[in-house]
Image (tube, rainbow, N blue to C red):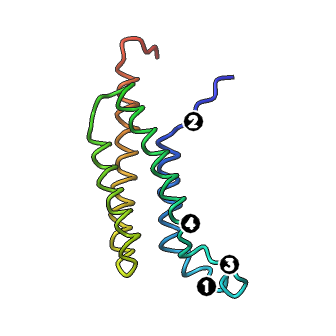
Amino acid sequence: MNFKINWDGLGIITSVACAIHCALLPLLVTSLPLFGINIIHNTVFEWSMIGLAFIVGSYSLFHGYKKHHRNQVPILLFGIGFVFLITKQFFHQYETWFLMPALIFIVTAHWRNYKLCHKSRCSSPHHTH
């Protein structure tokens, strides 16, 4: 059984999960603090999500770059998105304004990496249809 993880797909999922956490969760779970639970602006949770996104994204993008396409655009897009993501941690009053471009850049980086990896596999002389 040959099992492979789609790291770009996982990167997109973690980016979207982070965006949902930051943008929608405050609207949906405003009653959690009544029970002593605070995941909305929990610093440890937020930095953990950012760390997870960085680990998954870095692995996925550098693997795609090194093994498949040698195109730096996805890494550049990811870097720009990550600057926005980190910046939102320090300017909470503008969190959404930094989160939206972060999400767009990071998801676009993974999507572009996925397309480039797929294109390189399909155009490889060793690939059989």
Nearest to viewer (mark 1 / mark 3): 3
Q: CA distance from mark 2 to mark 1?
A: 35 Å
Residue 28 place in picture, x, y as percent: 60, 79
Q: Secondary structure at mark 4?
A: helix
Q: CA distance from mark 4 to mark 2?
A: 27 Å
Residue 116 place in picture, x, y as percent: 34, 33
| Residue drawn at x 64%, y 23% as measured from the top left | 2
Under mark 4, the amino acid is Val
| Residue drawn at x 54%, y 59% as measured from the top left | 48
Residue 36, located in which quarter of the rendered image? bottom right
Residue closest to the eye, 84 or 26: 84
Choose the circle earlier in sequence order: 4 or 1: 1
Choose the circle earlier in sequence order: 3 or 4: 3
Q: Which mark is residue 37?
A: 3
Under mark 1, the amino acid is Thr
Choose the circle earlier in sequence order: 4 or 2: 2
Residue 49 place in picture, x, y as percent: 53, 59
Q: Which mark is residue 44?
A: 4
Choose the circle earlier in sequence order: 1 or 3: 1
Is 52 above or below relative to 72?
below
